[in-house]
Image (cartoon, rainbow, N blue to C red):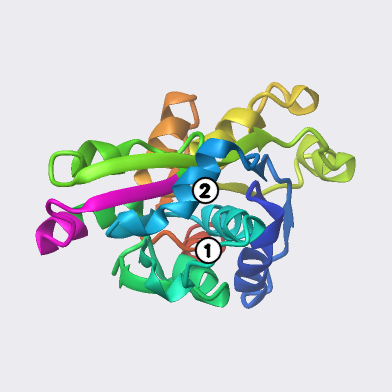
Amino acid sequence: MILSCQQSNSFSRFYNALKKYNIESINLPMIITKQVDLTDDIKNVINNILIYDYIILTSTSGVEAFNNLFNSINSNINKNKINIISVGKKTTQVIEKYGFKVKIQNPQNTAEELADYLINQKTIFNKNVLQLKGNIASPILKQKLGNYCNYKDVVVYNTLPNTNLNQETLHYILENKIKAISFSSPSEIEYFLKIKEINPINKSLPIFCIGKTTAKYAQNQGFENINISSKADFETMAELIVKTIYKN
């Protein structure tokens, strides 16, 4: 049994990817996301969205929050006139589902790779760029793009710990029925380590991480058997688990 700690709305992809190999998985979501309130500042940003040459979105949670906020002010702005930069294919699919236009799609999957791509292409040089993000998003885009464009970021959703944990899933962990754990963000690891019911946690248990940042955080927290997915998607993560845990 593989334990996932990702958000509920994306677990089905990981579950189905593992199911192809007849591997069972369960989910214990560590975080939830909550859209920010529609303040006057947010209204002003959305009403003046076209002053920005590009809008950067780096997560499906950000897309959903932006879409809800946009629709809530009954804006007359044509969605197709907003030039959006997407962090990757999965995010693009959600953006287009809501009727927005993706002007540029990152050929890779992470924010750091997106920053490097935009710099290499010189796409955003001297442009007005707005990133719509979560409250604990990595500052990598600001750090890398700030010297090349007029950069601004606005928080449209907050990431919070999930306090409603499934007790049956916790028992699986306590009874040592979990063969490995997957994490897709440092915050998932942070909140996982705070679960009182399962402390002390067996840090020799194999864990699988999406991204070097998540893996580095896991290492700093004392995990000993860390595996990193070569791509930031759950299908690649599933393949890595099969090769590592079920290779025999």
Task: Provide the residue span drawn in magenta.
Answer: 117-132
Q: Is residue 158 left or right of residue 233?
A: right
Confirm or deny contact between disc 1 and disc 2 (CB under 8 A): yes
Q: Amino acid at mark 2?
A: Ser
Q: Give the residue drawn at x 88%, y 39%.
A: 167
Near-viewer residue (112 or 220): 112
SS at mark 2 in the image: loop
Residue 232's image quarter? bottom left
Q: Is residue 61 left or right of residue 169?
A: left
Across and down, in percent, residue 41 comes to: 51, 37
Image: 238 above or below 186: below
Near-viewer residue (183 or 162): 162
Upstream in sequence: badge 1 or badge 2: 2
Across and down, in percent, residue 112 comes to: 28, 49
Residue 122 lies in the magenta-colored region: yes
Report which residue position mark 2 lands on: 184
Across and down, in percent, residue 30 comes to: 67, 40
SS at mark 1 in the image: helix
Near mark 2 (Cα within 10 A), the count class, few <14, some 14-19 or many ≥20, is: many
Q: Give the residue drawn at x 69%, y 21%.
A: 200
Near-viewer residue (204 or 87): 87
Report the Cα–Cα distance between label 1 and label 2: 9 Å
Q: Give the residue drawn at x 19%, y 58%.
A: 118
Residue reaching furthest to the right: 168
Which label sits on residue 90? none
Residue 68 lies in the magenta-colored region: no
| Residue 170 seen in the current view | yes
Image: 32 above or below 189: below
Image: 75 above or below 22: above
Q: Is residue 132 left or right of residue 194?
A: left
Report which residue position mark 1 lands on: 234
**Picture mark count:** 2
